[in-house]
Amino acid sequence: MTGPVVGSVRTRVSAYAVALDAERVLLTRLSTTSPIFEPGLWHLPGGGIDPSEQPVDALARELQEETGLELRAARLVDARSYAAHRLGVSWHLVALFYVATLREAGVPFVSEVDGTTAEVAWLPLATLEDATLSPAALDGLGPARAEGSTSTRH
């Protein structure tokens, strides 16, 4: 997603979880308060890294807030950069993608009220349509969609 750069550009570094369970992937649906990507798109669980916060700690926090599930382990697998313009703000997003192992692949629920997550679900990896995914979700899920999924629950 790109847009015109108007005035100053805000930078955000975010950590995202690629959590797979058999043939399903854990995804969140963006709410109307999403600052960078369009609401309604399916997105990877995760979000902005706070000042002085370690990326994996941010990933665990965001995963808990957006899905109610607990991170067991994470392995950095990729990083990407995005330019976007939304709600009058020009963004430079740096996304860190982690293959995430969860303590258990339970029933997810959104625990953060009024956040950027409207919904969370385990969705079949094979049936995801590109048009329903955020640019970061498309990139983060690219290898898993190309190779087929494997379980990350232990």
Image (tube, helix red, strand yellow):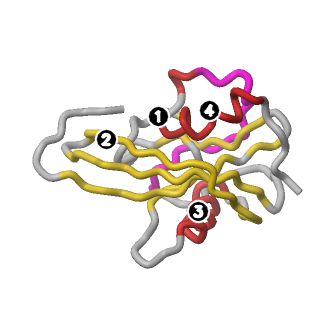
Q: Where residue 134 appears, x then y in whole percent?
A: 48, 34
Q: Nearer the viewer, mark 4 or mark 1?
A: 4
**Nearer the N terminus, badge 3 or badge 2?**
3
Magenta stretch: residue 117 in it? yes
Query: The N terminus lies in which quarter of the figure?
Result: top left
Q: Toward which corner of the image does residue 44 lie, by quadrant?
A: top right
Identified at 35% across, 48% down, the residue is 35
Counting residues from the N terminus, which is met first, the one under dot 1 or under dot 3?
3
Q: Residue 81: image x %, image y %?
A: 40, 45
Residue drawn at the location 54% of the way across and 67% of the way down: 55
Mark 4 residue element: helix
Residue at label 3? 59
Q: Quote the CA–CA distance across marks 4 and 3.
A: 19 Å
Q: Residue at x 69, y 43 (%)?
A: 26
Label 1 near label 4: C-beta < 8 Å?
A: no
Q: Earlier in the sequence, mark 1 or mark 2?
A: 2
Residue tagged 1: 135
Which residue range is magenta in the image? Answer: 114-129
Q: Which residue is mark 2?
A: 83
Horizontally, residue 150 falls left or right of residue 60, namely: right
